[in-house]
Image (cartoon, rainbow, N blue to C red):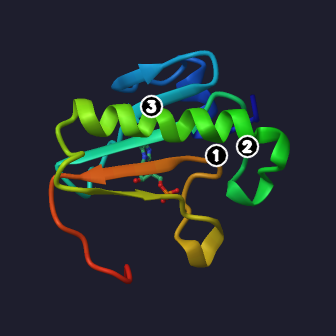
Amino acid sequence: MADDCLFCRIVAGELPSTKVHEDDLVLAIRDIAPGSPTHILLMPKRHIASALDLTEADAPLVGRIFAVAADLARSEGIADAGYRLVSNVGGWGGQSVDHLHIHLMGGRAFEWPPG
Ligand code: AMP
């Protein structure tokens, strides 16, 4: 757990969240300020600052995150219409919480490229 990390505190149960999935590696919660009808954040329980810090050794974790995202897309009813998975990295990438997370967003159409 990293000091002063918002998502580490959520993982630890020190701050409230709306959990939609939890296993030994991954926590998924609803975004507090959803940008689409479905907006879920999937994160490793272990503190990793961003996708920039992933290595090949993290392959099981990354595989788990994407498999859970696919399961949640189905259970949220957004799989057939299509949805978006995004991980913002750093300042220009738009990252505001420095604990790796993947946004699972769906329930509406999205533009490409993003703003
Ligand atoms: P990013 O800007 O890509 O780092 O994404 C951070 C996301 O975390 C934003 O979509 C925020 O709305 C969301 N967020 C911030 N605080 C919380 C919280 N306490 N619970 C759930 N989501 C949060």
Instruction: State whether residue 5 appears in this view.
Output: no
Using the image, tell me which numbered label, if any, was put on residue 28: 3
Amino acid type, label 1: His
Amino acid type, label 3: Ala
> Could you tell me which residue is drawn at 24 percent across and 53 percent down?
106
Alpha-carbon distance for marks 3 and 2?
15 Å
Q: Which residue is mark 2?
A: 48
Q: Position of residue 43 (x, y in %)?
A: 56, 38
Q: Is residue 5 toward the left or the right of residue 52 in the image?
A: left
Tell me which corner region of the image, top left, top right, bottom left or bottom right, holds residue 28.
top left
Amino acid type, label 2: Ile
Q: Which residue is mark 1?
A: 99
Q: Is residue 15 toward the left or the right of residue 6 in the image?
A: left
Q: Earlier in the sequence, mark 1 or mark 3?
A: 3
Q: Vertically, is 7 above or below 90?
A: above
Is there CB contact under 8 Å for labels 2 and 1?
yes
Which of the pair 44/98 is nearer the observer?
Answer: 44
- Quarter containing the N terminus: top right
Q: Position of residue 55 (x, y in %)?
A: 83, 50
Instruction: State whether residue 22 appears in this view.
Output: yes
